[in-house]
Image: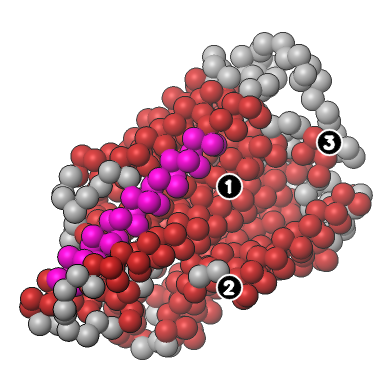
Amino acid sequence: MTGTSPQAGRKEWIALAALTLPPFVVSMDITVLYFAVPSMAADLNPSSTQQLWMIDIYGFVLAAFLITMGNIGDIIGRRRMLLIGSAVFGAASAAVAFAATTEMLIAARAVQGLAASTLMPSALALVRNVFHDERQRRSAIAIWSVGVAAGVSVAPIVSGLLLNSFWWGSIFLINIPVIAVLLVLIPLLVPEFRLPRVRTERFDVLSSLLSLLAVFALVWGFKEITANGFGALSAAGVTAGLALAAVFVVRQARLPHPMIDTALFAHRGFGPALALTFTAFFCVIGFGLFSTQYLLEVLSMGPLEAGLWFLVIPVLTGVCAPVAASLVGRVRPAYVIAAAFLVVAAGFTAMSQLTLERDLLLTIGGIAAIGVGVSTVIPLLTDMVVSVSPEEQAGSVAALQRTFQELGGAFGIALFGSVGAAVYSREFAAGLSAGPVAEVPPGAYETVGAATAAASRLPAEDGSTVLAVAREAFTGSLNLGAAVGIGVALAAAVFAILRLRHISYAGEKEEAAVAEPEPAGVEAEPAPVAD
């Protein structure tokens, strides 16, 4: 409890700064590639399928291996896993930077994703090990989570600056000094933690394979929906993923030493917190592509200018996330979480009102509200998930929570993308039917980027018409997507109050939560292994 748990000192807070580096580099590398694709394509000349894998393979492998690597880290030692993963991530970053062929680049990005899957759960579990006091742990997780928001927001700026002066490989070499600092600080500041020896021989290969295939199939199915719409292949992928996930859950309930202890779901806040984590990333990642394209294609911003506007998100998050973490000591977290989702809904409301006019206050305000609302709520949800798990299961539970983030983002991209593509195609075709123009390539009916490229190759008058119609159609699709986001965010706020209102950090007596059920089969918490 708060009053009896050991307090963290200066060393622990410096250790937190080091543990914030893994989520920063991992999240940065998810999006840093986007602006470099044209120059990479010109240099390596990939096919359209290869180019898709260049972009997607990192996220595929990262999501698929999270649960497995979180469990392995619990067994061999979380600090050891973090250091091994960091070294591999740095080496893979260099391999990507100097890749001479498309195949080499895709392979190196896959290794990067595998290494990234070791970093996130190990780093978060070590935060759980270092900070034992409940209030300090909530503050630490809030600060740690800022690293994720900072990585996503800084990536476009770093990419734009480096691409202006250097070749595309430089955007991956920037990881190496960060990894070098991490490799020096972690052994000095962070204690090791691993499971007792009696449990280190219990790794279940079949469970690992089931989790890997389930997540991979789900993410692939969602991405297939984004690329080609809902069809037989995407339905098969999602169905197979759900079936494999069900088999995985059933198996975990029967194992004496499962990868994920299903008894944790007996805690009434555990499942809802995971569901809200999924929803939060559904909102921010799913709608993020709309936001970026609107700045680049409709408002005609350059990558660097657009990236600089996104800097407002980590700045505001750095203030709001710790404040929210401190508020839950006086206000039930359900109401803080609901308020954050209302902020997200307000952001979507602003985005639903956008037009072709350059209204930066409305645009950046809407983008910032969505990003800050989600970035504020994630640390609270993370703490709910991690805090109810025994210390020896923190790595696998952190991996589970991160998996829900990845799945939420993939599903959001699929749903928002499908809705947006349908509206854009209909509105673009209707707009062109108003007057005769030169022949327009089929791709222009699918994306605003393709329409912009096609407009530049048409006669001036026809090009202006196509560009205007495409921007109008895309803005209409963005407005409708934002309306969907409003509904999802409001539903999440209501869900948070209904399902989490029993949780209190202020010490009130709960009528239905006087004694939360303890996870079955959990042994006493072992102390961190001393070096």
The residue labelled by disc 3 is 519
From the top left corner, tell me how far across and down residue 324 is, in percent.
47, 26
Q: Is residue 482 depicted above or below 109 in this figure?
A: above
From the top left corner, tell me how far across and down residue 106 is, in percent.
49, 79
The residue labelled by disc 1 is 278
| Rendered residue at 65%/65% (across/down) | 238
Crowd tier of the residue under label 2, counting other residues whose Cα lies within 10 Å: few below 14, some 14–19, many 20 or above: few
Q: Is residue 479 magenta?
A: yes
* SS category of the residue bearing label 2: loop
- Which quadrant is the N terminus positioned in? top right
The residues tagged by marks 2 and 3 sit, at their Cα atoms, a distance apart of 41 Å
Q: Is residue 210 depicted above or below 47 in this figure?
A: above
* SS category of the residue bearing label 3: loop
The residues tagged by marks 2 and 1 sit, at their Cα atoms, a distance apart of 23 Å
In the image, 378 versus 441, the foreground residue is: 441
| Rendered residue at 35%/67% (across/down) | 426
Which mark sits nearer the N-terminus, 2 or 3? Answer: 2
Which of discs 3 and 1 lies nearer the camera? The answer is: 1
The amino acid sitting under disc 3 is Pro
The amino acid sitting under disc 2 is Gly
